[in-house]
Amino acid sequence: MTLRTLAAVAAGKLARAGLQALGRGATAFPGLIVLAVDPGAIRVMTAGLAHGTVVVSGTNGKTTTSRMLADIVGAFGWTPIHNRSGSNLDRGIATALVAGSDWAGTPSGDVAIFEVDEASVPRVLQRIEPRVALVTNLFRDQLDRYFEVDQLARRIGASFAGLPETTTLVLNADDPIVARLGEGHRGRTVYFGIDDPGVGGRVPQAISDATHCPRCGTRLRYERVILAHVGDWACPACGLARPRADISAVRVELLADRGRLRVAGAAASAADALDVPLPGLYNAYNALAAAATADALGIGTATVARALAGFRPAFGRLETIEAEGRRLRVVLVKNPAGFNAAIGALLERGGQHRLLAALNDRDADGRDVSWIWDADFEALVPAVTHAVVTGLRARDLALRLKYAGLARDRVEVLEGWSAAIRRAIALAPLGGEVVVVTTYTAMLALRDALARMGFVRQFWED
């Protein structure tokens, strides 16, 4: 440990202690201080971890998947350092390392699980040589910040090509954009995917971001379409096709509040069962990605199953909050594919729903909110009895609900997070449920209001 790194750790710890004394989360600023003092601190502090570093990225699912992985390695007997708050830029990684180390910069854990913002992958990989790098999927998201999907994929692929042979890539075989990311990589690649023929349809979805081959540009041909451009795909011109999945879900059963997977390796004769305590096909994918990454780390499916059995979702990811005798079910949405997957899981439960819908356009949400016109609100609206709408772009969202068919007398636009929460609660009967559909910074604001009301802890305390 260099003197510069020691000084960076001390500065970061002091900043973290000061912010926490003021009641702040201290999830990013201490890391900014660390990296200002020593730009190489992350590399130095992760170099001695006995079981290495795992990087988890992708458009959707990285927070849930990284939490699953942290639980899995913990169940295996390892001690993870994890940016659990979801602060997923390099400053959040540095903060997590400072929080998980002593004043000499010695980590208290033996493995790091880092969620990484997909646009930040090239920069983060300049600071870390991971043992495993996972990409869950790549969808259109925040075009003002993340560029077009193919441009983002090229940048990630170039950064993967510079990784050493000792790094294992774990890639979604069902996503043609992701599956190709390993073409320039010198080391091992593990693919995961869904091989249950009962999952998915035959018609590509309108929100698809990869209708054409990422290699030659010919229109892709699909045997199955699972979500957007994710499925069983092939190029009829150049031969690029979905790779065989090393870790495969051979059977997927989706229930109202959970999923069940039969997972097999490429050469396995019998499948292992995973019970996923979260609803929706996208959470089945998250669990499958975690299982594939565990396999790359040498951790078996029995440990994965044991860890998932007690899994709790991250804040905002189908989190359930009790408030004045009602349940608030929080659904984070930020792009068309994520919205359709999350709402699909909600609709599988059946019944009518009361909504608290919140839309912001801050930097972390993406300034461009036009994505709401591509999301399938038309599928949601018939199941909505009433919607309370709030946020910086509340009127845009109310207009979208109107054009999706929700009657004007079933929509209320309210300013103020607390006022919107109280109105949504008041409209639900005792024992009833309010579905909170929200973008990222709106979710943070709503949870802050809920914390001040005494219904939840602050997210950094989770």
Image (cartoon, helix red, strand yellow):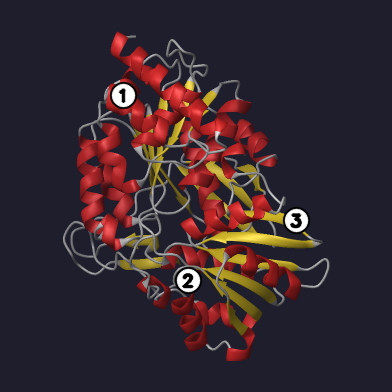
At label 3, the amino acid type is Glu
Three-letter amino acid code of the residue under disc 2 = Gly
Up-down relation of residue 283 to residue 388 (above or below): above
Location of the N terminus by quadrant is: top left
Secondary structure type for disc 3: strand
Marks 1 and 2 sit apart, C-alpha to C-alpha, by 38 Å
Q: Position of residue 94 (x, y in %)?
A: 39, 29
Q: Name the foreground residue: 412 vs 270.
A: 412
Query: Does residue 336 appear to the left or right of 458 in the view shown?
Result: left
**Foreground residue among 41 and 139:** 41
Please state which of residues 361 and 77 is positioned toward the viewer in this rendering. 361
Point 42% across, 14% down: residue: 105
- Which residue lies at the image location 34% right of the left edge and 47% below the top edge? 118
Q: Disc 2 marks which residue?
A: 201
Between the residue at mark 3 and the residue at mark 2, the CA separation in whole angstroms equals: 37 Å
**What residue is pinned by disc 3?**
322
Q: Please identify the quarter of the rendering in which residue 443 is found.
A: bottom right
- Near mark 3 (Cα within 10 A), the count class, few <14, some 14-19 or many ≥20, is few
Q: Any mark on residue 166, and which?
A: 1
Question: Viewer-nearest of labels 1 and 3?
Answer: 3
- Marks 1 and 2, the one that precedes in the sequence: 1
Residue 52: mark: none
Tell me the element at label 1: loop
In the drawing, does residue 70 fall left or right of residue 326? left
First reached walking from the N terminus: tag 1 or tag 3:
1
Could you tell whether 442 is left or right of 74 in the image?
A: left
Residue depicted at x 73% and y 75% = 427
Q: Quadrant of the C terminus?
A: top right
Q: How many marks?
A: 3
Whether 301 is drawn above or below 178: the answer is above
Q: CA separation, marks 1 and 3?
A: 46 Å
